[in-house]
């Protein structure tokens, strides 16, 4: 239930009224065990964001228009098959007055709304950059510029154990990166460590500065990175392509020899104060 200005009658202009939403989404069956993994379900925030974005788009006269827009956004979720949207005005008379619609992929065949797809800025920080005294100033600048920001880091300065076994070594290298991600988060409360695509998508839509913890996304991606996890700048390049980043800024480290096509990359020394 939200309070919003909506309606075609003059009495409904310049005033808010309570509007209640009931949304039911049918989703594709999960072909693997859910295992309490948020990335294997359709998260509730996809529904609440669909409502919030539809309401923020413009002032509407008709609940019918609002219902269509909510349904369209919900059906843009990869696993959504069919959606029931009921919207009711609670203050326009006795009882609740409203509309209910049902839409499915035949009505919205495979379309995805790219107008709200965030394209983040990725910033790779070396250990010198993480420890830089002007880190807070960089974050101030990035926040003032607006748009989603994701920090990537490498392993910390401690020696990473070596197993001589490819699969176990990948896990250890990824965990070493994640330990350093938490060290960065400890430097500034605005940096929030995220590990799932669901968390990341929410953070990008809501202006949160994220620090990427790579294990889950790397291990869950079907066509995962061809680079070793220890090659952390190359791993950040792969991740930038995965999330369709606007650009990648590497602070205090060198660019890899092989760069992904179509991605804007630049470097900056860790001593530089101006990150703009």
Image (tube, rainbow, N blue to C red):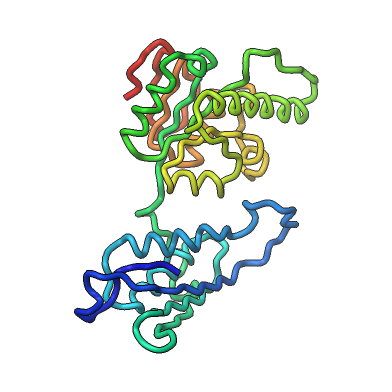
**Of 52 and 166, which appears nearest the observer?**
52
Q: In the rendered view, would you say 116 is above or below 171? A: below
Q: In the rendered view, would you say 232 is above or below 14? A: above
Q: Is residue 210 visible?
A: yes
**Residue at screen point 56% across, 26% down:** 186
Q: Quadrant of the C terminus?
A: top left
**Residue at screen point 34% across, 27% down:** 141
Residue 220, position as x, y percentages in the image? 66, 44
Indicate the quadrant where residue 156 lies. Answer: top right
**Of 5 and 142, which appears nearest the observer?**
5
* Left or right relative to 178: residue 102: left
Q: Is residue 228 visible?
A: no
Residue 270, position as x, y percentages in the image? 43, 13
**Of 98 and 195, which appears nearest the observer?**
98
Residue 226, position as x, y percentages in the image? 61, 32
Q: In the rendered view, would you say 204 is above or below 157? A: below
**Residue at screen point 70% across, 13% down:** 159
Indicate the quadrant where residue 32 lies. Answer: bottom right
Q: In the rendered view, would you say 233 is above or below 78? A: above
């Amino acid at each position: 239930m939200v309070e919003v200005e909506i309606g075609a009658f003059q009495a409904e202009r310049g005033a808010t009224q309570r509007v209640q939403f009931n949304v039911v989404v049918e989703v594709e069956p999960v072909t693997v065990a859910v295992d309490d993994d948020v990335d294997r379900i359709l998260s509730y925030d996809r529904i609440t964001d669909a409502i919030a974005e539809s309401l923020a788009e413009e002032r509407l006269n008709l609940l019918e228009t609002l219902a269509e827009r909510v349904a369209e956004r919900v059906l843009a979720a990869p696993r959504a098959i069919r959606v029931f949207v009921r919207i009711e005005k609670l203050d326009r008379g006795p009882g609740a007055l409203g509309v209910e619609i049902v839409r499915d992929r035949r009505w919205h065949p495979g379309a995805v709304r790219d107008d709200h797809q965030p394209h983040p800025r990725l910033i790779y920080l070396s250990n010198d950059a993480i420890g830089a005294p002007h880190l807070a100033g960089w974050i101030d600048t990035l926040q003032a510029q607006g748009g989603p920001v994701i920090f990537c880091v490498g392993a910390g300065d401690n020696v990473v154990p070596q197993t001589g076994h490819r699969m176990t070594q990948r896990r250890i290298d990824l965990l070493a990166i994640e330990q350093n991600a938490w060290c960065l988060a400890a430097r500034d409360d605005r940096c929030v460590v995220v590990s799932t695509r669901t968390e990341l998508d929410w953070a990008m839509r809501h202006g949160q500065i994220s620090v990427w913890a790579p294990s889950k996304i790397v291990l869950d991606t079907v066509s995962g990175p061809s680079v070793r996890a220890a090659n952390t700048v190359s791993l950040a390049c792969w991740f930038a392509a995965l999330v369709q980043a606007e650009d990648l800024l590497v602070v205090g480290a060198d660019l890899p020899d092989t760069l992904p096509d179509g991605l804007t990359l630049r470097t900056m020394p860790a001593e530089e104060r101006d990150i703009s």
